Image (cartoon, helix red, strand yellow):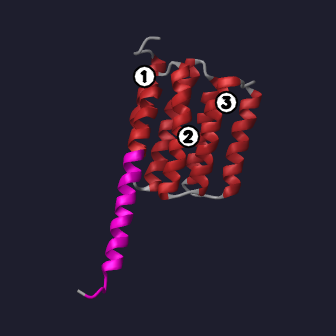
Amino acid sequence: MNPLSPAQLLGYLALVLGVSAFLQRDDRRLRLLLVAECAAYGLHFALLGNPSAAASVSVSAARNLASLRFRTAWLAAASVAANVALAVALGTHGRGWIPVVGSCLGGIAIFTLEGIPLRLLLLTSTALWLTNNVLSGSVGGTILESLIAAASVSTVVRMAQAARAARGAAVGVGAPT
């Protein structure tokens, strides 16, 4: 595959948007950038001829947009149901289920979790998308998911350190010297 084809160029755009998203400590900015990443990624996978990934990413874009305003378990369930229904309608089988499962985990994370737990479940989703991208021949997508994994781990570590520092400062407040 030509690394400068329109499909791959859209993958590179998704790469920039996705890494930017996962470097955010603010959950709202994370979600907004994920919407933009999913739009680019959906076109990328459609041009690569991977309909289950394109459908899963389209559901992900809608769910990330909805999660800006709503975060409930029933929307997570609706997101999972939409992903599975599209996969069944597209005749998904074998490796085509990898992005579907990744997207389902992302839906559960986006609608029900915050902070570090949100990012850890998204990291699991990232591992599944990385596998899909390697199997699909997605250059930008493979780089994207690899960098998202690294950015996610870095952000989780920074968030954990900040939480630990805040707990330490709270414990030290009012303590005799």
Task: Tell me which label, 1 or 3, sits earlier in the chain.
Answer: 1
Q: As drawn, which residue projects farthest toward the front?
A: 177
Height in image: 168 above or below 115?
A: below
Q: Residue at x 47, y 11 (%)?
A: 1
Question: Residue at label 1?
Answer: 9
Contact between labelled residues 3 and 1, with CB atoms less than 8 Å apart: no
**Residue 125's mark?**
2
Q: Residue 157: x and y, percent? A: 38, 53
Within 10 Å of the Cα at label 3, are there few (<14), some (14-19), or many (20+) other Cα atoms?
many
Q: Secondary structure at mark 3?
A: helix
Report, in whole angstroms, how far the alpha carbon at label 3 lies from the one at label 2: 12 Å
Tell me: 32 left or right of 66.
left
Within 10 Å of the Cα at label 1, are there few (<14), some (14-19), or many (20+) other Cα atoms?
some
Tag 1: residue type? Leu
Q: As drawn, which residue projects farthest toward the top?
A: 1
Q: Is residue 24 visible?
A: no
Q: Residue at x 55, y 18 (%)?
A: 48
Q: Secondary structure at mark 2?
A: helix
Q: Nearer the viewer, mark 1 or mark 3?
A: 3
